Image (cartoon, grey):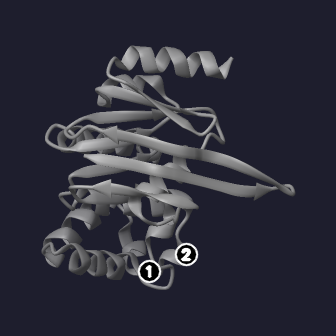
Amino acid sequence: MIRFENLSKSFWVRGERKTVIDNLNATLPTGTSLALLGRNGAGKSTLLQIVAGSMRPDCGRVISDGTISWPVGFGGSFHPDLTGAQNVRFLARIYGVDSEELLVFVQDFAELGKHFHMPVRSYSAGMRSRLTFGASMGIPFDTYLVDEVTAVGDAAFRRKSRQVFAERVKTTSAIMVTHEMAQVRQFCDAGIVLADGRLTYFEDLEEAIALHLQLLQ
């Protein structure tokens, strides 16, 4: 369960304050893979970062009764001066998992070769995404936050990423941001649409997709 209580977030944009989350009160169910839909700039990635705790809201709070991943695909999850391997070991200690097992999983999954032992600051955006995705999938979270990351890499890597993610969401919850409706239908059970700072939950995924497509017109 993830609950939003009086949650608000705004930014200064060209001298004006833009509200992307406006006094949000909602409860997201446990054991459901949710598609987080909305126009570009609606605040989807911002909401994921607030849920993960990597961004502070202006006011309000997020309450959860389980563990939540960092936003997979968000490069800020890792220290740029540490190597990929060092970052993975650090995460293992934080989340209480076996560091060697996680290291082996991520090194095999991310396919970074010698770069795995180089500083993350030297990585391309795609390499960082592969590292964050691999590390997240290697840790048993109750809820996974995924932001467009299954589109990273070549066809074989995307296929592998989707297979691993599909296995994880069979027994956990997820909140997924993607512009590909095929992925939404493949991975998600229900949908939430963020528009004008407000969140609308749809148990029927197709209703969420329909509203999302309508807002894009």
Residue at image position (46%, 66%) is 54
Marks 1 and 2: in contact by CB < 8 Å? yes
Q: Which mark is residue 161?
A: none
Task: Give above or below for 207 relative to 170.
Answer: above
Tell me the SS state at disc 1: loop
Q: Amino acid at mark 1?
A: Met
Residue 181 picture location, percent across and down: 46, 24
Q: Which quarter of the image is occupied by the C terminus?
A: top right
Q: Classify 10 Å Cα crowding around label 2: few (below 14), some (14-19), many (20 and above).
A: few
| Image quadrant assignment for residue 26 | top left
Q: Is residue 114 above or below residue 42?
A: below
Determine which residue is flagged by label 2. Answer: 122
Residue 139 percent coordinates (x, y): 21, 62
Q: Which residue is mark 1?
A: 118
Query: Which residue is painted at 36% across and 20% down in the image?
Result: 205
- Quick one: SS at disc 2? helix
What residue type is disc 2 on? Ser
Q: CA distance from mark 2 to mark 1?
A: 7 Å
Q: In this view of the protein, which residue sits in the foreground, 24 or 42?
A: 24
> What is the quadrant of residue 175 in the picture?
top left
On screen, residue 188 versus residue 123, left or right, reads left
Front in this rendered view, residue 53 or 5: 5
Residue 133 shows up from this direction: no
Residue 142 appears left or right of 162:
left
Residue 200: x %, y % from top left: 46, 29
Q: What residue lies at 64% left-to-right and 35% top-to-bottom?
A: 196
Q: Is residue 199 above or below residue 56?
A: above
